[in-house]
Amino acid sequence: MYAVVKTGGKQYRVTTGQKFKTEQIPADVGAEITLDQVLMAGEGESVKIGVPLISGASVQCTVVSHGQYDKVRIFKMRRRKHYQKHQGHRQRYTELRVDAIRV
């Protein structure tokens, strides 16, 4: 069984037992989280599509870890103007493990 969930402004296709990284969620490692914004769920030929969400559907997840992605380097330059700007950014993430999909 799989589901398409919305969290952190993005959509993820998840299955039971899968691990995935999403935007940082303020929860402790080992905590149970319920994602209730399920857009689509299905198994084989049978698919339920929400308008826009499936009512009563949820995905049960466990927080595995927190971390940061690799640094994204930003460099701006204007030629002949003696202007250079260096920036960097490391986005934080939360890794989740899908325990159950309830439709």
Image (spheres, grey):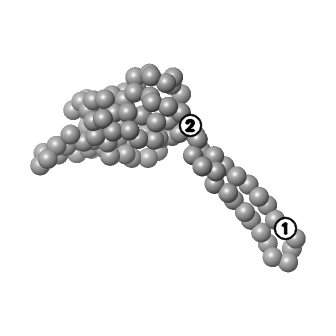
Task: Specify the quadrant that holds the C terminus.
Answer: top left
Circle number at residue 67 = 2
Task: Specify the quadrant that holds the N terminus.
Answer: top left
Residue 39 visible, this orientation: no
**For the point 45% across and 41% down, which residue is it?**
21
| Residue found farthest to the right | 82
**For the point 27% across and 29% down, which residue is it?**
100
Locate residue 47 relative to residue 7 in the image: left or right. Answer: left
**For the point 72% across and 63% down, which residue is it?**
75
Secondary structure of the residue carrying tag 1 is strand
Q: Quadrant of residue 16?
A: top left
Quick check: 15 above or below 74? above
- Towards the viewer: 70 or 54: 70
Q: Amino acid at mark 1?
A: Tyr
Locate residue 36 relative to residue 41 in the image: left or right. Answer: right
Q: CA distance from mark 2 to mark 1?
A: 34 Å
Q: Nearer the viewer, mark 2 or mark 1?
A: 2
Locate residue 6 relative to residue 39 in the image: left or right. Answer: right
Dot 2 crowding, Cα within 10 Å, few <14, some 14–19, many 20+: few
- Towards the viewer: 14 or 50: 14
Q: Quadrant of residue 99?
A: top left
Tell me, yes or no, whether the two marked residues, 2 and 1, touch with CB atoms within 8 Å. no
Q: Amino acid at mark 2?
A: Gly
Residue 66 visible, this orientation: yes
